[in-house]
Image (cartoon, rainbow, N blue to C red):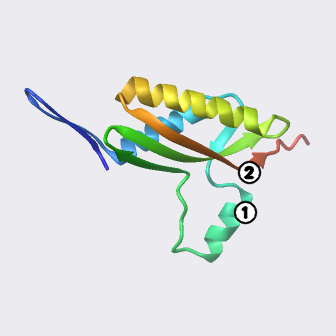
Amino acid sequence: MNKEEIHEFGDFEIAKEALESIIGQAALQVEGVHDLGGGFFENIFQRFSKNIKRKAIETEVKDSMVKINLDIIVEYGLVLEEVAERVKEEVGKVVNKMLGLEVGRISVNVIDVYIINKD
């Protein structure tokens, strides 16, 4: 699952956790993204099924091409599809620039909407 290159002075490898961390940070930089994964219903589901935990970011790397599945929570009042498209653009740009990986597919799933409680 790691990207690995052989160089004159040794190997270069990107751990899956590092890749997913970079993807997460890129997504959180997009205006309107409140958080990754989780959400009210997801948290309730996990309480009753402790053995099953769905990750907010899933990746698959093959031949220097990455496929990304990303769950986000969007702030209430925004156009969900527009936020998701901006996430795809930002994540693709960052993954390509920082890691030199080609992005094959980015699937963004809006799993919840964050509503600010104005009391």
* Residue at 50 percent of width and 44 percent of height: 68
* Residue at 51 percent of width and 41 percent of height: 105
Whether residue 110 sits left or right of residue 25 in the image: it is right
Position of the C terminus by quadrant: top right
In the rendered view, would you say 37 is above or below 47? above
The residue pinned by badge 2 equals 112
Q: How many marks?
A: 2
Q: Residue 100 in the image: x percent, y percent?
A: 35, 27
Whether residue 30 sits left or right of residue 101 in the image: it is right
In terms of secondary structure, where does tag 2 sit? strand
Whether residue 63 sits left or right of residue 92 in the image: it is left
Front-most of residues 33 and 91: 91
* Residue at 71 percent of width and 33 percent of height: 83
Q: Residue 118 in the image: x percent, y percent?
A: 89, 40
* Residue at 74 percent of width and 51 percent of height: 112
In terms of secondary structure, where does tag 1 sit? helix
- Please tell me how crowded label 1 is: few (under 14), some (14-19), or many (20+) other residues with Cα within 10 Å: few
Front-most of residues 9 and 29: 9
Q: Amino acid at mark 1?
A: Phe
- The label shown at residue 119 is none
Whether residue 9 sits left or right of residue 99 in the image: it is left
Q: Residue 82 in the image: x percent, y percent?
A: 74, 32
- To which quarter of the image does residue 18 belong? top left
Front-most of residues 46 and 16: 16
- To which quarter of the image does residue 102 belong? top left
In the rendered structure, are the residues bearing label 2 and label 1 in contact, judged by CB atoms less than 8 Å apart? yes
The residue pinned by badge 1 equals 41
- Mark toward the start of the polypeptide (2 vs 1): 1
Q: Amino acid at mark 2?
A: Asp
